[in-house]
Image: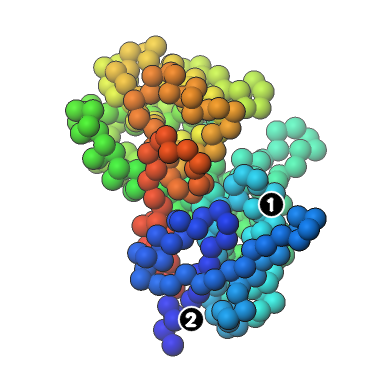
Amino acid sequence: MTNKEKTVIFSLTSCEDLANKVCEELGMKKSCAIVRRFADNEIFTRPCPDTDVKNKDVIVIHSTCQPVNDKLMELLIFIDACHRGEARTITAIIPYFGYVRQDRTIDFGDPISAKLVANCLKAAGCNRVISVDYHSGAMEPFFEGMECKELYSSSVFAKYYRERIKKFRISLSDIVIVSPDKGGLERARHLSKALGDLPIAVLNKYRPEPNKAVITNIKGEPVAGKYCLMIDDIIDTGGTIIAASKELLKNEAKGILICACHGIFSKNALAKLYRCGILDIAISDSIPQEEDVVSIVSLAPVIARYIDEHF
Ligand code: R5P
């Protein structure tokens, strides 16, 4: 049996379309999982009885997006079931890793919820955790006793924007890559490189209170007369992107294009974003979207490549 024949891929309720695309790219069949609720709403999930996971390398593709706690429990219970079914290894591919932003303490006594989630995955029987565009570099040490790997969305966004800018008659030489905060600089570097080493500007951001973003100044390459292609990991309330866009336009940027791996869009964020004059917004399919109002770029090639190279 080859490694691929020993590998079974499942998806749960958050990433079915993405997992289907991954399987299509790999030429593999997705295996069947049961997910149902008891009368009191508790979750029951496991591989379908006709899918034997014993001695297999199980891959489960599932984002722990909203409702975060439900999606997390779903994943943990499924991993527990595979562990009890004597899977050889269990890999959780979690395109959007809920609680990822709670990766450090700010005040004494704060929780580090991202670490707690990593502990829960380990306790459930997970051997390897793969995610895309973490919030920061803090995550890796949290996965004690498990392998972990961060994948990047920059290649799929670079491909998307190479084509998309033609619609706006923008050429690559008109673009500055922008990170809305220092924490995102590495991400901006990846995108810059994928587009042929474009210049980079970084904004200084601070949060006077949770979910509120204030931009103080811009560092790096000048943005005046340029189109700013801003990359972030997450758009949640939209506060960061809106504050950053205002600052860039104040500094005479010609136009703003946005890409962010994870589109959470809380609190009517999308409407607010479009009101501030952004030309284009692209997100990935790490989190399924109800409305078809932004461009969605699939992470399937990135995830399929990882699976192909490692299984
Ligand atoms: C954080 O600091 C992250 O990189 C994102 O910039 C942030 O999570 C976006 O959140 P919001 O859209 O609410 O400003």
Whether residue 88 is visible, yes or no, is: no
Q: State whether label 1 is within 8 Å of ligand 1.
A: no
Front-most of residues 113 and 63: 63
Front-most of residues 118 and 15: 15
Q: Secondary structure at mark 2?
A: helix
- Which residue has dot 2 on it? 6
Density class for disc 1 (Cα within 10 Å; few <14, some 14-19, many ≥20) is some
Task: From the top left corner, tell me how far across and down residue 224 is, in percent.
Answer: 30, 16
Considering the image in quadrants, where does the N terminus appear?
Answer: bottom left
At label 1, which amino acid type do we have? Asp
Task: From the top left corner, tell me how far across and down residue 112 is, in percent.
Answer: 71, 44
At label 2, which amino acid type do we have? Lys
Considering the image in quadrants, where does the C terminus appear?
Answer: bottom left
* Residue lying at the far bottom of the rendered structure: 1
The image's mark for residue 70 is 1
Above-or-below relation of 62 to 286: below
Q: Residue at x 34, y 48 (%)?
A: 156
Q: Is residue 96 left or right of residue 69?
A: left
Above-or-below relation of 291 to 35: above
